[in-house]
Amino acid sequence: MILKRTEFLARTHIDEQTLETWLSEQWLVPLQETEAEAFTDADIARAQLIHELNHELGVNEAGISVALHLLDQLHGLRRAVYELRQGRPRG
Amino acid sequence: MKSPYEILGVSKTASADDIRSAYRKLAKKLHPDLNPGDKKAEERFKEVSTANDLLSDNEKRAKFDAGVIDAAGNEKPQQQRQYYRNYAGPNAARGASNPNYESASAFSDFEGMDDILAQIYAQQAQARRNAKGADVRYHLNIPFLDAVTGATQRLNLPDGTTIDVKIPAGIETGRIIRLKGKGQASQGAGGPGDALVEVSVLAHPQFIRVGDDLLLELPVSIKEAALGGSVKVPTATGAVMLNIPAGSNAGTQLRLKGKGVAGRGDQMVKLRIVLPNRMDQQLNDFLKSWTPAAEDDPRKEFQS
């Protein structure tokens, strides 16, 4: 599912200004589609995570940047390990 | 079900601040997105969230303390929550992820990562080579009497070699004989696989197998049936002489003890009376002059 900015804001219940902050912090990096942003399910779930880190877990902005940076590396590693376990196609 | 106080590890008199700080402490440890590979974390996180929802709401907490609602707390319809971890890493559904986030920087400093991967793949390949060789399936048709008495059959393999297959007495169609170590060789140190020989027992023109018994229909002449006598009868283990009692009718069954399958069952011999190929004059003359007894009607069962 691909969402435009307005649809994304409605789905995630965040305001425009918050989104601008998150974009400038690069907490969210939506795909670009012909001059406009294209938000995906991954962005929605990530926005929810940012919201929870901030409001429910009491993580401040600096903490969120650190957490997301580490999480992105962790997922990259998880994929590498997963692909390793699958083995290369034979031949 | 544990009470929400137990779940958060706080006392019943805990203040709102105590509860929030207890919740945050647990949530930071259990949040599914902070535990991408731990399935149990989601379950426990839900438990903790539900407890917090209940205790952080003064009205709900009062109701729970008064016993009006249970620990599940008037459960509001819960939507299936999609966590970020479902869209990242190897779990990501195709098309739903965003490649801008995932980063390989955690291992970009591993020099020769490709060499490491190559080494691991080589080890996996060696492990495959060292596996036991494959089992090979064969099919073998066995003559009826060999199946009854047991035998050794030679099996010609596609590579030109032969195996002697020992066929146990009494084997039936569909059984599989396993010959250990007669399958394909291992590519490494795993030892060969097995040969699996599936058996079909061929039919016999005279014998029929019924369980452990053998059934044979034996043609006899009128004279042998009427007057009795000793006749030669084939069995699975060679011919024997069978004594036919005088006055044996067609369909009479005689038993040869211990002449069944693998010496277990018996051989049943069913008599079939056969007229001479060409009726001779003597027999014709006798039959014309012969009047059967009135009560001896072969069809008396048919009369109502």
Image (cartoon, helix red, strand yellow):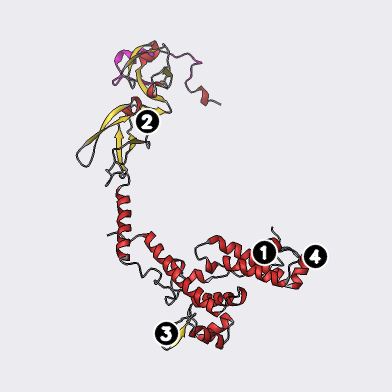
- Residue B283 is a magenta residue: yes
Element class at badge 4: loop
Discs 3 and 1 carry the same chain letter: no
Q: What residue type is labelled 3?
A: Glu
For label 1, the residue is B8
Q: Residues within 10 Å of mark 1 (few under 14, many from 20)?
A: many
The answer to which quarter of the image holds residue B31 is: bottom right
For label 4, the residue is B66
Could you tell which of marks 2 and 4 lies nearer the N-terminus? Answer: 4
Q: In this view, does B162 lie to the left or right of B223?
A: left
Parent chain of label 3: A
Discs 4 and 1 carry the same chain letter: yes
Q: Identify the residue at image location x=51%, y=16%.
A: B295
Residue B250 in the image, given as x and y percentages of width and height = 41, 20
Residue B218 in the image, given as x and y percentages of width and height = 36, 21
Above or below, B193 relative to B7: above
What residue span does the magenta drawing correspond to? B271-298
Nearer the observer: mark 1 or 2; the answer is 1
Could you tell which of marks 4 and 1 lies nearer the N-terminus? Answer: 1
Compute the Cα span from label 2 to label 4: 76 Å
For label 3, the residue is A33
Residue B22 in the image, given as x and y percentages of width and height = 66, 67
For label 2, the residue is B171
